[in-house]
Amino acid sequence: MPVVLLVVALVVVVLVVRATAVAGRGLRAPRPASRPRPADPVRPVAPDDDPEFLRELARRVRRDDSPA
């Protein structure tokens, strides 16, 4: 007899969960359509990606290599 009660309780729980899920679907407000975000501008991530840094580095190397 206890096994039958356990099975009945399990079936009741499953039915309640399903009924709640079905009823909850109609209560939610529809999500507004999201616009795609504009792409972020590409910027240097590391110093060796930065053209200005590379120009400055090349200028320093030329200056150090020049005969004194």
Image (cartoon, rainbow, N blue to C red):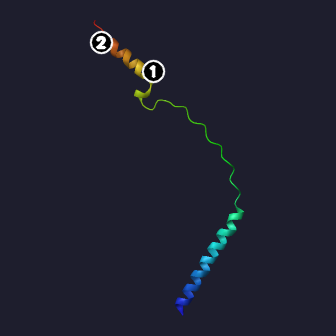
The residue that mark 1 highlights is: 52
Crowdedness near tag 2: few (<14), some (14–19) or many (≥20) residues, C-alpha within 10 Å: few
- How far across and how far down the image is residue 50, in percent? 44, 25
The residue that mark 2 highlights is: 65
Instruction: Calculate the distance from the C-alpha at mark 1 to the C-alpha at mark 2.
Output: 20 Å
Crowdedness near tag 1: few (<14), some (14–19) or many (≥20) residues, C-alpha within 10 Å: few
The image quadrant where one finds the N terminus is bottom right
- Residue type pointed to by label 1: Glu
Residue pictured at 29% horizontal, 12% vertical:
65
As displayed, is residue 36 above or below residue 67?
Answer: below
- Residue type pointed to by label 2: Asp
Given contact means CB atoms under 8 Å apart, are the residues at marks 1 and 2 in contact? Answer: no
Residue pictured at 36% horizontal, 16% vertical:
60
Q: Is residue 49 left or right of residue 38?
A: left
As displayed, is residue 21 above or below residue 31?
Answer: below
Where disc 1 sits, the SS reads helix
